Image (cartoon, coloured by chain):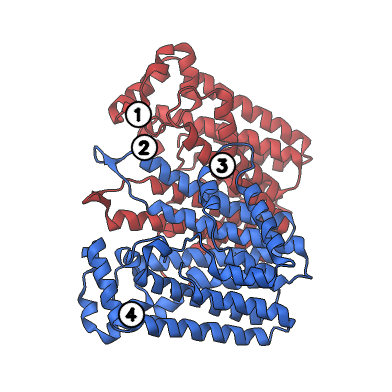
Chain colours: A blue, B red
Amino acid sequence: MTRRSAVPPPVTAVLDASSRWLPARLGEVEDRLRAAIVDHGDPLGEDAATTLAAGGKRLRPMLVLLCAGEGGDADRAVRAATAIELVHMATLVHDDVLDEAPLRRGHPTVAATSGRRRAVATGDLLLSRAFAMLADAGDARSVALLAEASVALARGELAQRHDAFDLGVSEERYLARCRLKTATLFECACLLGHDDEHLREFGAEVGLAFQLLDDVLDVTGPPERTGKARGTDLLDGTITLPLIEAARVDRGILEVDLHGLDTDSAVQLCDRIAATGALETVRTRALEMVASGKRQLESAGFEVEQRQLLALVADGVVQRYS
Amino acid sequence: MTRRSAVPPPVTAVLDASSRWLPARLGEVEDRLRAAIVDHGDPLGEDAATTLAAGGKRLRPMLVLLCAGEGGDADRAVRAATAIELVHMATLVHDDVLDEAPLRRGHPTVAATSGRRRAVATGDLLLSRAFAMLADAGDARSVALLAEASVALARGELAQRHDAFDLGVSEERYLARCRLKTATLFECACLLGHDDEHLREFGAEVGLAFQLLDDVLDVTGPPERTGKARGTDLLDGTITLPLIEAARVDRGILEVDLHGLDTDSAVQLCDRIAATGALETVRTRALEMVASGKRQLESAGFEVEQRQLLALVADGVVQRYS
């Protein structure tokens, strides 16, 4: 369930189709991200600056900007787009807290301990700056939306920890967790851009599809595209839909001791999951979600061009390889 | 620089002097804290519930409520008091991420890793709920105040990591870090209660004094009162004012290799610091800060009783033993 990438294929199509205005506005988001992270008068944002420099697809800012539209309040949209990416980056930085911790004399080394505390503080800094950015503009509705999404993210992470290594996790439980951990932030992005309940549905479907595809990519790789080893979720004990679907076909998968996996046997389990046809099932589910999301757009009363751009983003979510 | 306690001596005096209204309002804060942490329909708030049950002095909520006053908007004040304590609790939970991490085959055990990720997510949950609580009431000014304080907290923690084990840290740098890490949240508590710049000064002085006394208690103990071993800051590489003052008298302290300390030699270093008279110097500084803070109260245009209660809190900050 980790998501990190430097190659943004879906982005390209959207940018091409909106070259008149969207790239410039996304550029403003980058400027503001940099200002929020780097330029605060001391060299303390190192970890955050690394995360910023690593780039990313900027899907959530793009959804904010597209839902706000070319003619919308650009300053407000750019601010909200920046804030939501800061929240997303905070979760990425906090994920790093998992990193290995070498011991010395039975205690963590200073480097490991210090790195961990720094990662926690850096994530807190990003999260707090996101709220500061919206609150400074006096935008209480947006703060409320973002705070609720941020609560959901944390609850999703707690649910993931709670359910880790439990092969009895149901599809419903998996989907509920994905809603919290991924879909709510996509919903929030859309609603920050434009206040329309159809956009909540659109964002939720696209966000879920995004997570489903992420979970497929964890099984398929290739690592040089996804930036992580195949089976990382399995090693982490995270039960995903590909595993749940595979176990419906190959019941023996339920007997695997996930605690006993190493990097090699995790790759073997990936192959076993792929052999059941589960990946096609999950990909189809993701495509259905995207289709359902796009139908919501019809009701949102957008201009044709705005709807088409949002549909491109939705399509891109399931067409990516990283 | 850790702060945790179950025994609240300064609290008693304030509660006695305000038994007509303050205890009831603090009770509402406890109810809201419980509701924010425990009652969200799933058993995910375990770590947060533990932090809640551990209690605390509730100094920051008390400052909010006292600055708002008996006749102020009680619902608004209780909400802000709860939000600020949630932020404080988030920092306590995130401090736990430092906890030891046993390894197995060179990797952290699942329990350690999972505990760490859970602590991070729990802190994020508390932080997000704090902002949600204020934003839901449409209170953008309060969100902005709290977000700025939360940014400062994170920057203070980063500064502490950056300066760890550096015996060359100056008093100015130490004080700047304490302002970020401790004083800003006290300032914020006062300003959440009542919009008056004199209260910012009052909160800042009281918060700094609080941190100075915390750092004295780390050297003096006793552990059965403070709840942590003497010299915990030293083992953590945190340079505090008692150490800086002691090194002015006993230059040899600057030659100590903090990386090489163990629990015994840390206690010996505490004794060496105490022998220089540095603790009295720092206590005197803290008392001066409290006095200066109380002078600010004179200008804040409060009724006598409200001023007296706030002065009691300020005095309590330097009279405590935990």
x and y, in percent, of residue B91 in the image: 49, 48
Chain hosting mark 1: B
Residue B1 located left or right of residue A133: left
Frontmost residue, B133 versus A304: A304
Q: Nearer the viewer, mark 4 or mark 3?
A: 4
Given the image, on which type of amino acid does mark 1 rest? His
Given the image, on which type of amino acid does mark 3 rest? Arg
Q: Which mark, residue B155?
A: 3
| Residue under the point 44% across and 78% down | A175
| Residue under the point 46% across and 48% down | A119
**Residue carrying label 4:** A244
For label 1, the crowd category at 10 Å Cα-Cα, with few meaning under 14, some 14 to 19 and many 20 or more, is: few
Which of pointers 1 and 3 lies earlier in the amino acid sequence? 3
Determine the image quadrant of residue A262.
bottom left
Given the image, on which type of amino acid does mark 2 rest? Val
Q: Which mark, residue B259?
A: 1
